[in-house]
Amino acid sequence: QVQLAESGGGLVQAGDSLRLSCAASGHTLTINQMAWFRQAPGKDRAFVASIHWIGNNIYYDESIKGRFTISRDAAKNTIYLQMNPLEPADTAVYYCAAGIGPPVDYDYWGQGTQVTVST
């Protein structure tokens, strides 16, 4: 089992920055990839960015490319999402996910952290 704990959300103004963190614990050696997803009010959960241990590959959704950066601190079993500049459309609950199998599968999820961007 893997446990994930997100932190770093909050209420900010458009143009501001935030950095989300996701710390993994438990059987972390089984993890192959981790990612960020988000769910805006009234919408389905959507992919934001992922980072893969094999090849150190990184992927972004087009909607946030150039504004968000995903990174990893392997020693701390933690990934980050640097978000800058934020827009009101980025308002959502942000979830961290971890996968132990194929690159597109995610088996474990955090409880989410709220990001609210005001105009």
Image: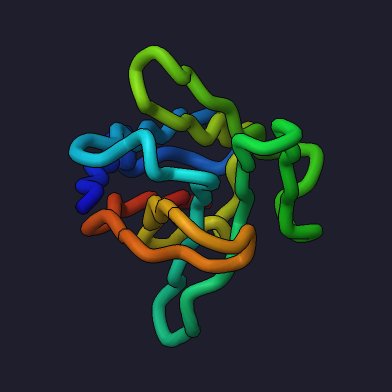
The foreground one among 34 and 84 is 34
The foreground one among 17 and 14 is 17
Q: In which quarter of the image is residue 48?
A: bottom right
Q: Where is residue 29 in the image (x, y as percent from the top left)?
A: 37, 34
Q: Quadrant of residue 109?
A: bottom left
Q: Seen from this angle, which residue lies furthest top?
A: 75
Q: Residue at position x 52%, y 25% from top?
A: 72
Q: Where is residue 37 in the image (x, y as percent from the top left)?
A: 49, 60
Q: Residue at position x 54%, y 46% from top?
A: 33
Q: Residue at position x 20%, y 53% from top?
A: 1
Q: Position of residue 53 (x, y in %)?
A: 60, 35
Residue 104 higher or lower than 16, as above or below: below
The foreground one among 1 and 39 is 1
Q: On the picture, is 25 further left or further right than 104?
A: left
Residue 63 higher or lower than 16, as above or below: below
Q: Residue at position x 28%, y 42% from top?
A: 6
Q: On the picture, is 26 further left or further right than 39?
A: left
Residue 46 higher or lower than 7, as above or below: below
The foreground one among 66 and 109 is 109
